[in-house]
Image: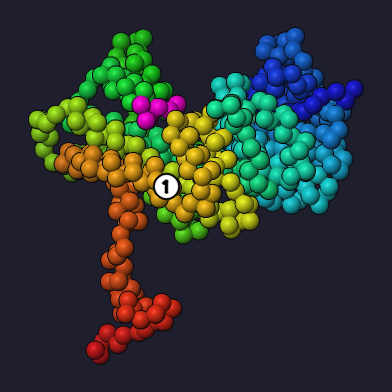
Amino acid sequence: MSTCDIGLIGLAVMGENLVLNMESRGFHVAVFNRTTSVVEAFEASRGKGKNFVFAKTLPDFVAALKRPRKAQIMVKAGAPVDAVIEQLIPLLEPGDIIIDGGNSLWTDTQRREKYLKEKGLHFFGVGVSGGEEGALKGPSIMPGGSKQGWEALAPIYTKIAAVAEGEPCCRHMGPDGAGHYVKMAHNGIEYGDMQLICEAYAILKAALNPSADEFAEIFGEWNKGKLDSFLIDITTKIFSRKDPETGKAIVDLVLDKAGQKGTGKWTVGHAVEMGVPLSVIGSAVEARILSSLKDERVAASAVLPGPTAKPFTGDRAKLIEAVRDALYASKIISYAQGMVQLGAASKLYNWNLNFGDIASIWRGGCIIRARFLNRITDAYRSNPDLKNLILDPFFRDTLLETQANWRSAVTTAIEYGVAVPAFSSALSYFDSYRQANLPANLLQAQRDYFGAHTYERIDKPRGEFFHFDWLNP
Ligand code: NBP
């Protein structure tokens, strides 16, 4: 009997929680997993007594789906997605929809969409954010694919998504790879946010050396104001958790060696390819790489001393406020850069992305959810053609109000020899973007000197190019 509204293949952490979410909202869902014992285990545990079809074979899974069939793949990104698609193709009919809800590379999604279109099938690349808990209770969902396919999927995805300010955190992003690209940019921004929080921690630690409990208090206070966000909230909680074995703060026992799965590198790589500065996220990716060189750093620390630590004699509360402002200002720059990247990709691929929609669906369910996304939503809804977020009146005024504290926090970091690549690259972006004149006149002269690359002159019309005979002036 074909009674299921949707089916999902891949019952790992994300898939299992997503189908429970779908079922809890009244959808009849078919489930399948390559290792079928996983389906049996799900049937006996969390799926027990619920409105699922527990399929033991792919043909049974497909047979359970209402037409047009909607089959969502939730497996490891890369070759496994192609493998499942190939197995589904002979079982489906024109008009059916295959959805990939994993973290796939957007160019893979574009390739798959084109390939399946030739077979009369719709393909959707859907970014899902919020981890395990979001998947279960309501994630932020970023779907990309045809308008026609979206009409069939919208009733399901808008119902299982998180809700923020009365709106579902799910909107059609655009065709082919748009959803996966926006999800990738989201992950890049997540990298930036996490690094910025770590830099705030590093400055305060070097200058004031608060205990983990004091850090929990500082971040808890920040979370009540303009920095109110999921990541500040979990950071507060992290500082207050104790290791049962030693009684020490667990954060002080965690090895300082960061991992990464790759979406940050994809984000930065494509920004560079398009000629978009993405320095905050770039710094965050590099900081993770540097942190992973633990043994090299330990050896270097013995031979490369920094400035001698001096006791902090200033006003503790003022420094905490300065660091908070630096974090907020740098976060604004990171989002501004991320939005410029999305704008460039939208142009490149003709996606017609709506930045107000993007900011609005990040307000709930996802890892970067934060109060200030309301402001970004407002900024783009009142001016969809905004060139750069930092030119929006609210963000411009905020940066102008916080810049003295921002500079003071970065100065303190430099005095203490604390690396703050994301804080300082954000400030450098601000200081470059707001300058009518940069030292690139000298750079152009250098290029012309060694490579006869020519230059424009400030006293002649733009578009006229000159070469100077530097060797025989
Ligand atoms: P994993 O990324 O760990 O993938 C495990 C699933 O993939 C299992 O169901 C496994 O089946 C299946 N699978 C593999 Br591996 N190779 C397969 C193949 N060749 N054919 C069929 N199935 C195959 O699961 P996850 O952590 O739930 O993530 C799923 C997707 O969602 C990924 O793309 C991930 O990047 C994305 N995502 C994850 C999170 C998160 O917080 N974890 C958040 C947002 C997005 P088996 O049981 O037979 O091995």
Q: Quadrant of the C terminus?
A: bottom left
Q: Position of residue 428 (x, y in %)?
A: 30, 52
Q: Residues within 10 Å of mark 1 (few under 14, many from 20)?
A: some
Q: Which residues are magenta?
A: 225-230
Q: Position of residue 324 (x, y in %)?
A: 29, 32
Query: Is disc 1 placed on a helix, strand or loop?
Result: loop
Q: Quadrant of ligand 1?
A: top right
User: Residue placed at 85% from the left, 29% from the top?
Assistant: 66
Residue on which disc 1 sits: 392
Q: Position of residue 462 (x, y in %)?
A: 41, 77
Give the quarter of the image for residue 164.
top right
Give the quarter of the image for residue 206.
top left
Farthest-out residue, bottom: 472
User: Can residue 95 be found in the magenta stretch?
Assistant: no
Residue 320 seen in this snapshot: yes
Locate residue 118 relative to residue 415 in the image: left or right: right
